[in-house]
Amino acid sequence: MTLLRHFGEPTRRLFFKRTALPIIVVTLLVATLTTGLLLWSATQSDGVAVSRQKSLVALIISKLESGIAHDQESVTVWDDAVSALRSQDAKWVDTNLGTWMHTYFGHDEVYILDPKDAPVYAFADGSAVEPASYQSIRPTTAPLVENLRARLKQGDTDGVTEQVLTIGASDMVVISGHPAIVSIKPVVSDSGHIAQVPGQEFLHVAVRYLDGSLLASLRQDYLLDDAHFSWSNMLSSEEASYPLVGRSGSTVGFFVWQPYRPGAFVLFQLVPTLVAVFGLALGGIIVALAALRRRTLRLIETENHIYHLAHYDLLTGLHSRGHFNSRLADALTLLPATGEQLAILYLDLDRFKQVNDSFGHPAGDELLREFADRLRRLTLEVDTVARLGGDEFIIIQRAVAGENEVKTLCEHLIESARRPFEVAGVQVFVGVSVGVALAPRDGVDQVELVRKADLALYHAKAGGRSGYALFEPEMDQTLAKRKGLEQDLRKALQTPGHIRVHYQPLYTADKSKPSRAGRTQSAVGSPLTCSYHWQRKRGSSKF
């Protein structure tokens, strides 16, 4: 027994040194490397995920600020709004400039300032309030109002495009201890028929708080867990933040949320498995590869989600305005090489607002989704269908053989829109008007093509709803002539003595014949014609 004991001890020591110890070392090394690889990959994937979510938040904040201004233009560029404010039609103003902006766009507060910056209307807490309540935010908005008034007086149009109709002023501010976005837009005539003195327009002030119902919407729409506002950037290890910076460069506060960390989540799920297979390096590697694959899929899913948010309209699933611009630029670049033609079709639904007013905004959204589905069915896979906002859509028709092909598509679009829509359990009827510009016939500049299609849409609407029009050079000339005529007539109306009325009697051989309708009878029964003359720079004009 003593011999076996002395013999066995060296053998066990040798086994430990030659077999067990190397296996233990290799196992520990593999486990360490595997654990390190998992921790590194989890950290990297979490970092990428957090970075992408920060980019998403930056995009959301940017869209919020520009979106509020775009929302305002749906009611501030409107003849009816100018007339209602001038006539002090309180009911109309409350319905269209206050309640509508709150219920449809989610604006928390709305104020209307007269040309002397005195408040004439206020909306807060879901209903109209005393205009004097504006005084609580006047110190915050006064610099923006002053700056906008100065720009309006100077005739500044910097930033005005086919999509941005008027200049404005906006900023991230603090109001009564709450972070908010304030946007100010002038209330102007959409037709140009109402004379307005630059700088003395009514102003529409919209306020959207960043720590109220907006946060709940962001949490639901963008899957941002525990999203909240914080005055400081002191975060826990599980939180991420994005600074909210005003126009002056000062930080208003921080948007804070708990980012989704796919790496940490997967690693936590793998802990029991890693403990169970600690001695099996190969098993650990397989698990690591499987985890990496799952994390990669999650990252790809997140990236696809961000891409979808940036390139597609959330309501209809159509391409967004930005994605449309990108695809149009690419298509125009290829035209010289392919020798093809393309068409830009600018669509605007007729009587859409009546549907919203009659059945509510959810019904309007349902109609827009159904109309978007019809557009998809009528276009080809190579075409691009986008929603610009509200009830405006635009199509890039590729590889166009000629005008007849475009006209056929226009007729199909109009016919499709005429068919009834099942909305809110009832049938509603709308229509669509279409304006068309062709490339390269009407040019290859992206902005010009969209402008010409929009101008053609204007002519289509002027000729009656549910119609279409192809751009013609005369449309530009007609627009220029009309603007010149409007300016000359406006100046004549403002200058005493520049408009004269001329009467001319008409005689007939047979006085028993009845006079034509619409003529003025003279004392002897002869009809009179009437014409108006005014003095222009290049001579007199009449109509």
Image (cartoon, rainbow, N blue to C red):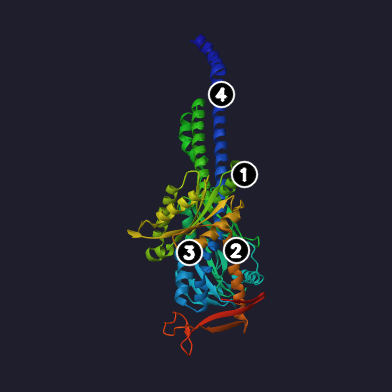
Q: Going from the N terminus, do you reach mark 1 or mark 3 first?
A: 1
Q: Residue furthest bottom?
A: 523
Residue, disc 4: 26
Residue, disc 1: 336
Q: Going from the N terminus, do you reach mark 3 or mark 4 first?
A: 4
Residue, disc 3: 463
Q: What's the amino acid at mark 2?
A: Gln
- Judged from the image, the secondary structure of the residue bearing numbered disc 3 is loop
Instruction: Tell us which disc is closer to us: 4 or 2.
Output: 2
Q: Going from the N terminus, do you reach mark 4 or mark 1 first?
A: 4
Q: What's the amino acid at mark 1?
A: Pro
The answer to which of 534 and 451 lies nearer the viewer is: 534
Q: Going from the N terminus, do you reach mark 1 or mark 2 first?
A: 1
- Judged from the image, the secondary structure of the residue bearing numbered disc 1 is helix
The answer to which of 116 and 268 lies nearer the viewer is: 116
* Label 2: few (<14), some (14–19) or many (≥20) C-alpha neighbours in 10 Å: few
Residue, disc 2: 477
Q: Residue furthest front?
A: 509
